[in-house]
Amino acid sequence: MSLSEQLEGWGPRGTAGVSFASALSFDAVSVALGGRPVLTEFSLTLNPGEIVCLLGESGSGKSTLLRVAAGIQRIDAGTVRINERVVSSKDVHLPPDKRGIGLMFQDFALFPHLNLLQNVTFGLRHLGRDAARAQARQALRRVGLDDRESDYPHMLSGGQQQRLALARSIAPRPGILMLDEPFSSLDARLRETVRAETLAVLRETNATSVIVTHDPEEAMLLGDRIALLRAGRLAQVGASSDVYDHPVDLNAARFFSPLGEIAARISNAAAATPLGPVPAPGFAEGTVVVVAIRPVGAITLSLTGPGVQGRIVARRAAIGTLLCDVRVEGLDQPLEIRQPEMPGLVPGADVFLTLHPQHVLVFAKE
């Protein structure tokens, strides 16, 4: 099957079944596996119909949190509530099938011996045969697989298997949907469209949704809010723009993009750098700080002044942009700057750097 055929395979928007969204809250939840803490006093509340992306490095506790919410993993301390009902605590553990949660695994977890219709109706047995088939076919139609209901999972492409897994998770119309790295196995060319259509389906169902990812851009595109996990703890939570523009610390900023880091000292409420002063209100006079410069937005390159002079020492072409490594006198390492393509930006070229302080981050030196 060609790429264009895969991209065009989704059903019409607005046809997914609507769920009654549930609230979900974690209150000081702790989990240890094999004696090692995986979640530590984790607290977070999700509003009905909200999409929250759990973002963090491998081993930060993201997938464990999904398993806790779904009832697959017991907790050692704290409470989990769905619509204010305690479903997990040290003494309470409601079984997964009683929680009204749909779970889409990273590997899709499809049943290879069942056809597509049987895969989707598997979680609908309580409805009766005819009602289950009707609801399953509606879900298959929304993801564009209604004409393949008699096929088996191995007959589908990777993107189609992802769509089948999504259909199976939304068919019961759960109040909460959990998606664990749902796009990680897809080809980069296909991921963008599948991601957009999946987001459309989630909005249509209105289910409260939790999406696990380690991709910051994906989290920003999909989530109403981002919850950043670090070593089993909640490091920061907020709207994607807030978490990106105002990271809680230097490690959070590093997670979202590469940084050029410049050690500086505060003088007259500004950090003095070879690129010019950077306003830094709130820091005491003489405080040693780290000025963090992202590749995008913080600096503009030009071939003529004004600006601070530098020299391009390396250049890599990206789609529509250039990644330039620029050496500046007074800095130990070249700065990585993403710049729109223009003639003359070649290794060895002298350039001028204009700093945009409003897009520069300043943190106390750890």
Image (cartoon, rainbow, N blue to C red):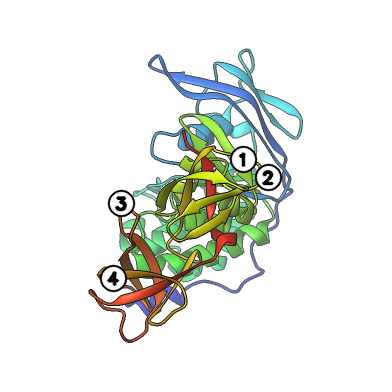
Q: CA distance from mark 4 to mark 2?
A: 53 Å
Q: Is residue 356 above or below residue 252?
A: below
* Residue pointed to by mark 3: 332
- How busy is the neighbourhood of tag 3: few (under 14 within 10 Å), some, or many (20 plus)? few
Which residue lies at the image location 55% right of the left edge and 44% below the top edge? 266
- How busy is the neighbourhood of tag 2: few (under 14 within 10 Å), some, or many (20 plus)? many
Residue 26 figure quarter = top right
- Residue 76: image x %, image y %? 54, 16
Q: Amino acid at mark 2?
A: Gly
Dot in front, 4 or 2: 4
Q: CA distance from mark 1 to mark 3?
A: 24 Å
Q: Amino acid at mark 3?
A: Asp
355 or 269: which is nearer to us? 269
* Residue pointed to by mark 2: 175
* Residue pointed to by mark 1: 283
Q: Earlier in the sequence, mark 1 or mark 3?
A: 1
- Residue 276: image x %, image y %? 49, 60
Q: CA distance from mark 3 to mark 4?
A: 15 Å
Q: Is residue 47 above or below residue 349?
A: above
